[in-house]
Image (cartoon, coloured by chain):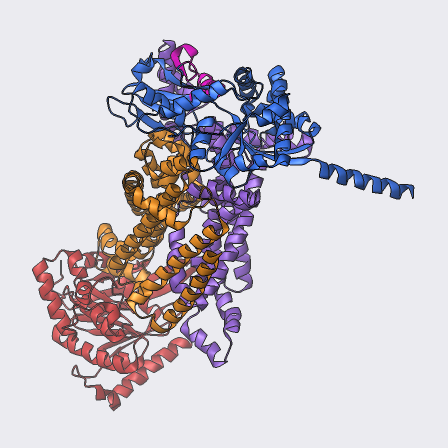
Chain colours: A blue, B red, C orange, D purple
Amino acid sequence: MKRLMTSVFALTAMAGSAYAADSVTLQLKWVTQAQFAGYYVALEKGFYDEENLDVTILAGGPDIAPTQVIAGGGADVVIDWMPPALAAREKGLPLVNIAQPFKSSGMMLTCLAETGIKTPADFKGHTLGVWFFGNEFPFLSWMSTLGLSTAGGADGVTVLKQGFNVDPLLQKQADCISTMTYNEYWQVIDAGIAPDQLVTFKYEDQGVATLEDGLYVLEANLADPAFVDRMVRFVRASMKGWKYAEANPDEAAMIVLDNDETGAQTEGHQKRMMAEVARLTAGSNGALDEADFNRTVATLMAGGSDPVITALPVGAWTHAITDLALN
Amino acid sequence: MKDLSGAQTVIEAKGVGLVFETGDGPLQALKDISLTIERGEFVSFIGPSGCGKTTLLRAIAALEYPNEGTLTVNGMPPDKARQSRAYGYVFQAAGLYPWRTIAGNVQLPLEIMGFSRAERAERVARVLKLVDLDGFGKKFPWQLSGGMQQRASIARALAFDADILLMDEPFGALDEIVRDRLNEELLKLWAATSKTIGFVTHSIPEAVYLSTKIVVMSPRPGRITDVIESTLPRERPLDIRDSAEFLEIAHRVREGLRAGHAYD
Amino acid sequence: MIWAWGSLAFWALATALNVWLARAHSRNRAVRLFIPALFGATLLLVWEGLVRSLGVSPVILPPPSMIGVRIAESLPILWADFSQTILKGALSGYLIGCGVAVAVAVLIDRSPFLQRGLLPVGNFVAALPIVGIAPILVMWFGFDWQSKAAVVVVMVFFPVLVNMVAGLKATDALQRDQMATWSASYWQGLFKLRMPAAMPFLFNGLKIATTLALIGAIVAEFFGSPTRGMGFRISTAVGQLDLPLVWAEIAVAAFAGSAFYGLVAVIEKGVTFWHPSQRGRA
Amino acid sequence: MRSVLPILTVVLAIIVLWYGATVALNAQWTRDQAARAGVEVGFSEIVRDTLAQTRPKLPAPHQVAAELYQSTWVEEVFGRRGIVATGTLSNRSLIYHGWVTLSATMLGFAFGTGLGILLAIGIVHSRAMDMSFMPWAIASQTVPILAIAPMVIVVLASIGIKGLIPKAIIAAYLSFFPVLVGMVKGFRAPDAMQLDLLRTYSASRARTFWQLRLPSSVPYLFASLKVGIAAALVGTIVGELPAGASAGLGARLLSGSYYGQTIQIWAALLAAATLAAGLVVIVGAIERVVLGRMGMRS
């Protein structure tokens, strides 16, 4: 009898927990790395469990467009940069920014000093490596503010679609390549090129910075109070994860490493990335700063003859979630 | 190089032996073959399969090399003779190239031997007429019957005017009616060109009908058991095959073949 | 819903028509072209119908009509990409790769030792997922079409080599003996006999190589390219959620691939008209 | 057996060429680095340096061999997450990634073979299907599958299909074609006389299929299975490429490329080629046994 009681009890307990946890699927913008440490920390440290969430983190990759994943219903919330998200919104996919853990932009252009490039004015006639797949928008905006054609020739710049790594710079196929402060830049350094042999141009310093990793959901879902409630809990736990990661960067890096399915990441690189990412998340409590949003929009609309977005986006962000999550 | 004093001897074999190395050990394909063939003769080689008749013909054409004895063609080693274009060879199958027309096939050896374009055209026309195929030059081999294909292959062997024509069961795959007609035509051709012909067959009537000399062979090891000089006249209508003389020679061939088998 | 039922009804009708045509008029040349065309049209219509009736987002799968409009709008872009990827990358790589493979086949044909050594190793390399070497070749040969051509060279080399080696052996003993009785030199034997005899095999390899060449050139662009080319456009357009453009490029690729294959098949028919497999369907 | 010596010779020649190419391709980096450091380098130093770079343009064979050993035996036996330490395969070992790729390959191969055979049956028995479908089957192979692989994965994920199956579907897409072509040939292999013989027995189409067409197609089946399984492997790897951080040899290739770890790329490539060769050899062995039993020893 007693045994039966226990098993019934165990069964109800199991059923209870199975019903209680709400599931959330998160699509990352890129492969598992310290850029997304906050989410992995929240997962491993039980912050999501505390909020009664069952979170699945889907790693991205070079040909995975988070916007397409969420449009297909493959995720509840995605991490993306603001330019492709706004572009998708204009294409008729109504994405809304619900939180912005990254305050500053980590994007920059890294050039070999031996090419003689010292200021953006020297780009003329050089070959620049750029990421595409939705990541080209900030670059195109910057070039059009500089008045440089991207079609090549003496008066413009030649653009290469950079692969996934820094080889174009090392093999001298490009004079400058796109890098992130927390990732590719250090790969160039690791390859054996000293920092004083490099010249870097941060988008942040050039006044053309656009907002990077933010959390986006489909506008229609925000009408559903249950969904909003889930997102509130998700953002709260995620931001807790981020702040924990900022405080304990080495532990966060090891958590990321353990979640990397390919086994290709190295400890040294992830710890350094975590330290750099912490600088970008530092100024944000998770809520979007409207001034940053306006600057991003202004940059994107300044795109000369071929702007990334043509109309002022309306309703592309909300504080509804962060107001509830952070107060 | 031709030995003009004894001009009549074309092919001479003295104690020729040939051993194949096979997976089951050495195989004595030819043993102690001695034979002389004179200019203008029509010599048939007959015997059961495995008796080495084809091997002997191939050795004469320098497609195989004997291990012992001496073999000369026109007083030269066979491969020298081959380079001096001593013989045309007709195989069991016509072996025409499907991507060439009949005329193209016939002139193939001429191209290889470096004849001029004009000479090639002239010779092709002549030999096609000889084998009664004029008008078919532009056809492809696969558009013709088996008998016509074999005639084309004979034309090809004749095209470069070799003195010696070696034929390895050329009509073996044809039906009897076609075969009779081709035999008759072959005799006419032989009379018209006075070539020396070596002819491998396993048909006794064919051998007797065509030959001036019949070489009977037997297997394991391949050797000559009898050489029969035909007494038939050179002019041979088809119905000669019903004559007593013909049957007499055929009988002798059959006896020779049977004697060879007694060794088994 | 009307779209779904309509397209399904059309499918049923078209299938019935095709079955009837195939039974009754299969000798007719026009009918033989019409049947696959109708089948293709049916596929497109069912696609259109399902996408419309199920309300599939064009960001996931655009309907063919939208793709068609996009093709018409972006002909200049499509042409620029086509010439970059197909004409420069795929075609030059195809010609070089097939040429080198034939030359190597002729060379190793003289040496049984090399054949016994090279063919197994060649088969091993051919089993390599060649797409994997694309990033390496992009690193070696730079971003422009040269690296794409290099990928294509590697992809087409082994299928053509293996087929050509087999083809050069395809002559029978009798034909080789014939050549010997005429005292033909090695090169005469090669050009008069073994090359023509190898053609059906060679074309087998060449046909396989056409599709490989196309795939190789497009795939290599994913690992770095200048700002034009079909692979570049596809990956960029996905990032911009411009799915109709993606499908327009795919349609061009499929069309170019089929045309390329068809061209090689037509040449094959001209060159190996004598082969039993070609003679049957005159 | 008599092929061993030639193969070894060729492999040896390749290794020698490889070392030569390693020096030639990596020398520029060595010279650049020396120039940046402001020192002169001699030939022997160039050779020594080119064979030991950490991210060479072309890694030397011994570097690749060391990486292969490191990422299989050493990782599993001594690694923190190896099978000895944890009881499960380490995600840093090629054995684990090879296994992930292999399972998707086998699943896709099974799909592709089944589909190819079914379509071939349809084509052999229906003239309409033959005439309408065959041209499109050829056209289907000219679609650059890698270009749409990411979309296939996204679309399937949106209807809830994830994990092995999307990769297997791409593998099946590539492997069905050789099987289809081979089996159409195979089912048509019986000559008119054999078919007429069965007709004199008034055999039904189904009976003709089971008793004649199917057995005579077996040699063709195996010939196309060998092509098909290699194609399935390529498809799986292609399917793994875009899905960045997941497991499998393709993901390994990509992450190697992403981090410029050329040694890791080459090790993954060799592992993939070995896997492919192994699969083909296994199909070949099954072929010998089956054909031997059927008295059709090839």
Q: Residue at x 50, y 53 (%)?
A: D112
Picture coordinates of residue C103 (x, y %)? 29, 44
Farthest-out residue, left: B118
Q: Residue at x 28, y 61 (%)?
A: C175
> For this rendering, which residue is in front, B42 or A212?
A212
Relative vertical location of residue B139 with respect to residue D41 in this rendering, above or below: below
Residue C281 visible in rendering: no
Picture coordinates of residue C185 (x, y %)? 22, 52
Residue C117 visible in rendering: yes
- Res C196 quadrant in image: bottom left
Relative vertical location of residue D259 with respect to residue C282 in this rendering, above or below: above
> For this rendering, which residue is in front, B128 or D282?
D282
Q: Which range is magenta?
A: A179-205
Farthest-out residue, right: A1
Picture coordinates of residue D256 (x, y %)? 48, 30
Picture coordinates of residue B260 (x, y %)? 38, 75
- Res A193 quadrant in image: top left
Q: Residue at x 39, y 42 (%)?
A: C246
Relative vertical location of residue C227 with respect to residue C117 in this rendering, above or below: above
Residue C27 within the segment the image draws in magenta: no
Give left or right: position of C280 versus C14.
Answer: left
> For this rendering, which residue is in front, C183 or B236?
C183
Residue A203 within the segment the image draws in magenta: yes
**Count the marks: how many?**
0
